[in-house]
Image (cartoon, grey):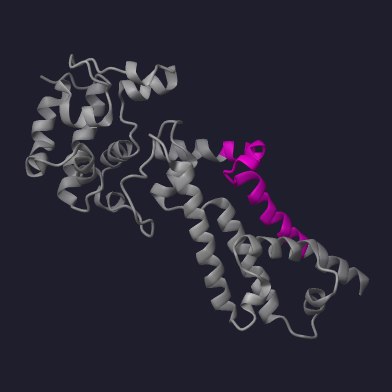
């Protein structure tokens, strides 16, 4: 009996470790900045798979691809396991006795503390079913995750300003069949198209000195590349002018939203083709006129 009791403790404490690992290694807060080494092995894989430069954050990729943080995934599994034990264990089983013992385990303490940080208490779930409790906990976790992602993804290399809803994958993932077009469009959404601005991020060039070489003496920003740069005048006339002619009078920000956040397949394909041609020309594969 003592052996079974010890085994029960070990099993439940393993789930505690599983939950804590996600907290220590995969959370993006200043308090755990020294525990981010395991994430360093995950981020290069994501950057390689998406072919994005290293200035793009893990949080920004999660927002764009609608992927859950590893911490959220770990806690969802832990909560599901805990609820199954609580609701489905027989009242005469060893697990039930363990859950009712006066001295709470480390595992239960960690879960209780996590639930408290989410704004709930154990008594909040007294009259709810297993499914209702899990749905409540999941929704709160997702809401908290979104707040973390939005704060961590804020910056220049982020698609944050294009979307307000994060419930479904952006349309271009399914609309653009060609991987080259999809990648080119993604680079534009992340504001990492090849440019003096992107190059300056790695060379530490002051932002106000990241000029375009087209002769206009302007910073080679995303807006400059899409709307003004002389080097892309011919491809702009082919792909973007049919769209921009209908957006006369709009601000640059609204024009960018029209080009990069539209659900219209025709607009998305035209912008993706422009970005693909821009990349080829920037890499010297297309000299232009």
Q: Residue 229, percent across and down? A: 18, 24
How many dots with numbers? 0
Q: Is residue 102 left or right of residue 261?
A: right
Q: Residue at x 47, y 45 (%)?
A: 151
User: Quick check: 200 left or right of 217?
Assistant: right
Dividing the picture into quadrants, the one containing residue 78 is bottom right
Q: Give 263 or 6, whichever is nearer the viewer.
A: 263
Residue 20 in percent (x, y) is at 69, 53
> On screen, 69 above or below 234?
below
State left or right for residue 180 relative to residue 19: left
Instruction: Work out whether residue 270 or residue 209 is closer to the camera in this orientation and state it.
Output: 209
Say which residue appears at 90% left-offset and 69% top-offset: 3
Residue 80, position as x, y percentages in the image? 61, 69
Quadrant, the C terminus: top left
User: In which quadrant is the N terminus drawn?
Assistant: bottom right
Q: Quadrant of residue 31?
A: top right
Q: Is residue 78 left or right of residue 67?
A: right
Image point (46%, 52%), residue name: 67
> Image quadrant of residue 86?
bottom right
- Which residue is painted at 75% across and 63% down in the image? 109
- Secondary structure of the magenta portion, mostly? helix
| Residue 19 is inside the magenta segment | yes
Q: Is residue 192 above or below residue 134?
A: above
Q: What range of the chain is rendered magenta?
A: 12-41
């Amino acid at each position: 009996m003592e052996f079974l009791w010890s085994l029960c403790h070990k099993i439940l404490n393993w789930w505690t470790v599983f939950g804590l690992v996600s907290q220590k290694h995969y959370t993006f807060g200043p308090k755990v900045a020294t525990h981010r080494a395991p994430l360093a092995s995950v981020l290069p894989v994501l950057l390689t798979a998406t072919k994005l430069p290293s200035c793009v954050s893990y949080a920004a990729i999660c927002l764009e691809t609608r992927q859950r943080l590893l911490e959220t995934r770990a806690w969802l599994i832990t909560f599901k396991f805990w609820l199954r034990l609580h609701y489905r264990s027989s009242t005469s089983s060893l697990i039930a006795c363990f859950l009712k013992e006066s001295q709470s385990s480390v595992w239960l303490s960690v879960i209780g503390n996590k639930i408290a940080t989410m704004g709930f208490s154990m008594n909040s779930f007294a009259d709810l079913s297993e499914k209702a409790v899990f749905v409540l906990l999941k929704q709160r976790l997702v809401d908290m995750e979104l707040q973390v992602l939005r704060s961590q993804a804020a910056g220049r290399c982020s698609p944050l300003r294009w979307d307000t809803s994060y419930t479904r994958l952006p349309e271009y993932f399914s609309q653009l069949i060609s991987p080259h077009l999809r990648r080119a469009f993604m680079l534009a959404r992340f504001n990492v198209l090849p440019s003096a601005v992107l190059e300056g991020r790695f060379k530490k060039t002051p932002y106000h000195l990241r000029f375009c070489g087209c002769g206009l003496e302007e910073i080679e920003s995303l807006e400059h590349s899409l709307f003004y740069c002389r080097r892309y005048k011919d491809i702009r006339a082919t792909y973007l002018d049919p769209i921009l002619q209908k957006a006369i009078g709009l601000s640059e920000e609204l024009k960018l939203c029209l080009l990069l956040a539209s659900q219209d397949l025709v607009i998305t394909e035209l912008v993706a083709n422009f970005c693909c041609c821009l990349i080829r020309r920037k890499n010297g594969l297309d000299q232009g006129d």
